[in-house]
Each structure stands twice: as structure tokens, then as C-alpha cells.
Amino acid sequence: MRVEGVSQPYRLMGILNVTPDSFSDGGQFLETEAAISHGRELVAEGAQIVDVGGESTRPGAEPVAAAEELARVQPVIEGLAAAMNSMPTHPQISIDTSKTEVARAALAAGASLVNDVSAFRADPEMAGLVADSGADCCLMHMLGEPRTMQREGGPRYEDVVDDVKAFLEERLAFAVREGVSEQRVLLDPGIGFGKTVEHNLELLRRLDELIPLGRPILIGTSRKSFLGRIAADRPASTRLAGTVATNVLAYERGASVFRVHDVAPLHEALAVTAATLGERWTARGAAATPTS
């Protein structure tokens, strides 16, 4: 949905998990043709980016070998790239991985954005690959790793917003030193990655404090467990209302890229929010949109 006369000041990243064990949609799109079809649906609903992942990063998830991850994602990216070449909107394909081997093959297959939840810490060659390829990238904050980040005893911070901001600032500086163009970088505070419910809410509440970092802020709250804990332990498939609420709040506080499972309702909610907030916010969001 687009509001007549109003430029779109945000981007929607549709989630396409080609995994058997993702927390919300694991196993739904393991077959290549089903995954490609769903990717096309996400674009038809308004996604400007389709984020393809072959390894679950849910709390407690076990690592997947690069060969297995690549076998899951490469044919899907190739099929999506062929389909998207004929689309007038020229949607972007993102590869959700922390492995250079997977990212390199995905970029060759047609992806142009590397979404690395480790922020270039898991694989020392990733930053160089992104720099040399000219791809966009997303650097995310995560305390620990998926297998351990939510263990009993809980993640701890001096001040979660200050700590996340300092981390993202350092990783952005690292990426630029490695040759990545600053204009190619998105930053993600990592909602749900090594954070309690209170940490997630504090990050959303004070999200505007991350805007001075100068790069587009990506938010990923879609269907996450903290929403269920707030709303009477609702299962993942019924957390749309909470997802909409958190993304609207994040947009108002300066986020401009939204990673979601349910593209169509989020597109409508953000379009109405953008129109309601007016031209000042439209100009802010449009300026924060990545260049590619």
C-alpha cells in the first residue's frame, strides 16, 4: 500500500526462512519452489527486501554447517533473482548469514545485502567480502551467540541503550576501516538477541538515541517471544498486533527499515503512521533510506 502524494519513508524486509527450526515458520518453506513463491508474495505485499536465511538464530539454536546452509539458500536466491529481474520495483535480496562462504555464493547468485547477526565478528573475512563486492550490509548487536544468549541468569548491561549504541558505533567504524562504504551500512540493535523483555522495551523506548549514529536503523521485533510474554504468552503465529505496535513505535522514534514476517499489515500500518506524522517525518525517513 502506498499513500497518494506521500513518498515512502521506510523499507520493509520480508523474512524468508529456509530452515526446519526457526521459531515461527520453521519448515514451512524448505522446498525451493515454496520458498521462491513465498518470496514473490512478500514483494507483492510491499517488501523492498527479501531476507533469505538458512540457519536459525532463535535462542538455543545449534549451528549449521556452511554446506548445508548454502544448499538451502542458494537455489532460492537464484530463483528469486531470476523472478525479480522482471519486476519494476527492483526488490533487493538479502542473505542472512554470518559465514563468508555462504555470503559469497549468495552474492554471486543474486543477493546484494549481507545481514550478519554477528556484525562481522564470527568470520574475519566477511568485512572484506562485503567491501570488495560493494554489497550493502546490516550489522546487529547480539550478546553472546544464539545457542547461549538467553540462558538462565540472563543477559546483563550497565545501560542497555548506551551499551548497544557503543557496540554499533564500534562495529560501524570497524566496517569502514575494512573498506565498507558507510553509505552501505544498516544498524540493528538486535531486539531479542541476548536481551530480557525489559531490555527490549528500553531499547524501543529510547530508540531515538541511536539515530545520531547516522545510519538507517533496522528493527526486527516480528512475532518475537517478548511480545508473547507481555500479551499473556500468545504463540508466535498470533503476535501480529504486538509486532505492529512495536514497529509503529520504532518508526516514530526514527527506525526506517523493518524486518517482518507479515508484510502487508505492516505496510499499511507504517503508511498510515507516515502520513499522520507528516512531511517532516517523511523527509527524515527518505533521507535515511540506503542508497542501493
Image (cartoon, grey):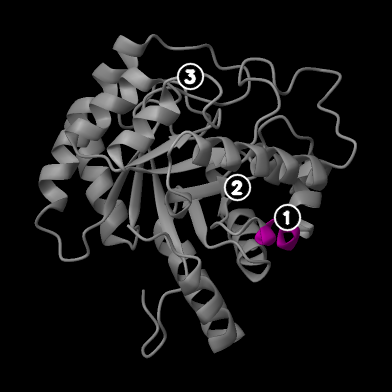
Q: Which mark is residue 204?
A: 1
Q: Which mark is residue 124?
A: 3
Distance (Cα) linking label 3 and label 2: 28 Å
Give the labeled residue for mark 2: 221
Q: Is residue 275 left or right of residue 170?
A: left
Dot placed on the residue nearer the N-terminal end, 3 or 2: 3
Q: Nearer the viewer, residue 141 or 243?
A: 141
The magenta span reads 207-212
Mark 2 and 1 residues: CB-CB less than 8 Å, in contact? Answer: yes
x 42%, y 50%: residue: 184
**Helix, strand or loop at mark 3:** loop
Does residue 146 lie above or below 252 as drawn?
above
Q: Which quadrant of the figure has residue 195?
A: top right
**Pair 2/1: label in front:** 1
Q: Is residue 128 left or right of residue 35?
A: right
Does residue 275 lie above or below 155 as drawn?
below
